[in-house]
Image (tube, rainbow, N blue to C red):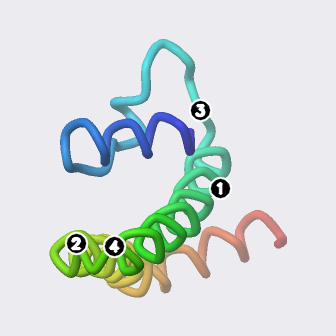
């Protein structure tokens, strides 16, 4: 999932949804794991771009990661309930 997310970001400038990831069917857990790994890779990429003084790309990376975090915060209650139902 992480590789597909990175490819989508670098080639199309967007975050690929779970349903858009190729012929392989992913579980929610696999997609979320890839999404979290993706944010780490975007952070590393932002550091590389910062060393090149490419503030536009650094700001884009920041905005993407902040968008993911905002979505996670908005879905936090639903996630908590799902974990309780699963006994996690």
- The answer to whether the residue labelled 2 contacts the one labelled 3, judged by CB atoms less than 8 Å apart, is no
The quarter of the picture where the C terminus appears is bottom right
Give the residue displayed 49% in from the left and 73% down from the top.
Answer: 43
State the residue position of label 1: 33
Give the residue displayed 49% in from the left and 83% down from the top.
Answer: 76
Residue at far top of view: 23
Within 10 Å of disc 3 (Cα), the crowding (few <14, some 14-19, many 20+) is: some
Determine which of the numbered discs, if any, sits on residue 26 in the image. 3
- Mark 4 vs mark 3, CA separation in Å: 36 Å
Of badges 1 and 4, the one in the foreground is 4
- Mark 1 vs mark 2, CA separation in Å: 22 Å
Answer with left or right where residue 39 lies relative to residue 64: right
Sequence-first disc among 4 and 2 = 4
- The answer to whether the residue labelled 1 contacts the one labelled 2, judged by CB atoms less than 8 Å apart, is no
Of badges 4 and 2, the one in the foreground is 4
Answer with left or right where residue 8 lies relative to residue 85: left
Sequence-first disc among 4 and 3 = 3
State the residue position of label 4: 52
- Mark 3 vs mark 1, CA separation in Å: 11 Å
Quarter-of-image position of residue 71: bottom left
State the residue position of label 2: 60
User: Which element is circle 4 on?
Assistant: loop
User: Which element is circle 2 on?
Assistant: helix
Residue at far front of view: 52
């Amino acid at each position: 999932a992480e590789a597909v997310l990175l490819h989508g970001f670098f080639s199309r400038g967007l975050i690929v949804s779970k349903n858009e990831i190729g012929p392989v069917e992913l579980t929610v857990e696999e997609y979320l794991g890839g999404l979290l790994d993706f944010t780490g890779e975007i952070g590393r990429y932002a550091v590389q771009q910062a060393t090149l003084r490419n503030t536009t790309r650094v700001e884009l990376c920041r905005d993407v990661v902040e968008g993911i975090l905002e979505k996670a915060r908005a879905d936090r209650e639903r996630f908590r309930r799902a974990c309780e139902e699963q006994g996690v």
